Amino acid sequence: MKTTGNTILITGAGTGVGLEAAKQLSKNGNTIIMVARNAERLKIEADKLRNAHAIPCDLSNFEDLTRLVAKLKENHKDLNMIFLNAGIAANYNLFEEADAYKTSIAEMTTNYHSAVYLTQALESLLAEKDDAAMLITTSGVVFAPDLLHPTYSAAKAALHSYILSMRLVLERKKSSVKVFELMLPLVDSPFSSAVQSDLKISPEKAVNEIVSGLEKNEFEMHIGLTKDIYEVYLKSPQQALELVNNLTGEN
Ligand SMILES: NC(=O)c1ccc[n+]([C@@H]2O[C@H](COP(=O)([O-])OP(=O)(O)OC[C@H]3O[C@@H](n4cnc5c(N)ncnc54)[C@H](OP(=O)(O)O)[C@@H]3O)[C@@H](O)[C@H]2O)c1
């Protein structure tokens, strides 16, 4: 996949990995459409970049999603890449303080359903292009859940399963649209502030690996420590479960 000359929608572009991706990809000669809820922060960041547009949007809100797609179809017909990266996670112990049911609805809506909506709504626009891609951020927890993020892990596992389905369907219909899954390890961003660990990598390092994986058409990117989780998982899912939960401090 080429990494210059694209028009790229990046969700979750206000902070962390999404913001770093917007910075690097705008520098590399791509047009960037940045999405997040905090409109003021998004505009400040977009104004610092070349060829970047800010569209505030709450991906957990159906009306916002439909408005976003309408704006993209009207103003950004050259869109050829979508990088669905926005995510939320609640850190809690099951059967203790938090309401797992309500938490799981919020996590599924933002992390999973918004991706189903946007891929479905934008697939035909992308398929008109010779070189097109969907990039979706997941995590090492798709192979083994992190007990401190139980419902988040389940939402990312659902997303992983959906990505496998989409990739096979698009391959079978010989679509030009490539599907990339970016499995991130612990990254030093606001998202992981509740997790104490010296294993966090910087958003810059994560995005460097993503860009290099795109250039090599590495469709399932196991970034940083997620490579180790994947290799252990192939031998023993139980050992992978233990490994993930030692990494985040839970035994
Ligand atoms: N950091 C890690 O350790 C880690 C590990 C594995 C996977 N990941 C995944 O990596 C991705 C990026 O996370 P990050 O580390 O860069 O975290 P982050 O800095 O917290 O970024 C998340 C972004 O998503 C946006 N967002 C959240 N809910 C939204 C909604 N309903 N609608 C629109 N935008 C929304 C946030 O902006 P607003 O608040 O302005 O909306 C923010 O820009 C996530 O999918 C996460 O699950 C992270």
Image: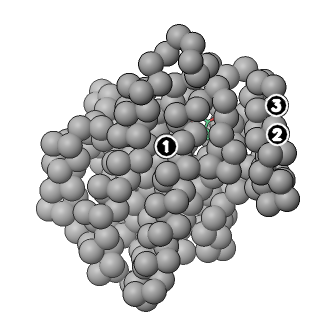
Comes first in the chain, label 2 or label 1: 1
Measure the C-alpha gap from mark 3 to mark 2: 5 Å
Residue, x 48% and y 83% (percent of image)? 171
Q: Residues within 10 Å of mark 2 (few under 14, many from 20)?
A: many
Residue, x 21% and y 56% (percent of image)? 69
Furthest residue toward front: 95
Q: Which residue is mark 3?
A: 246
Q: Residues within 10 Å of mark 1 (few under 14, many from 20)?
A: many
244 on left or right of 188: right
Q: Amino acid at mark 2?
A: Leu
Viewer-nearest residue: 9 or 85? 85
The label on residue 243 is 2
Q: Residues within 10 Å of mark 3 (few under 14, many from 20)?
A: few
Q: Position of residue 139 (x, y in %)?
A: 62, 46
Q: Which residue is mark 1?
A: 155
- Visible residue check, residue 48: no
Where's the C terminus, which quadrant?
Answer: top right
- Visible residue check, residue 187: yes
Q: Amino acid at mark 3?
A: Asn
Where's the N terminus, which quadrant?
Answer: bottom right
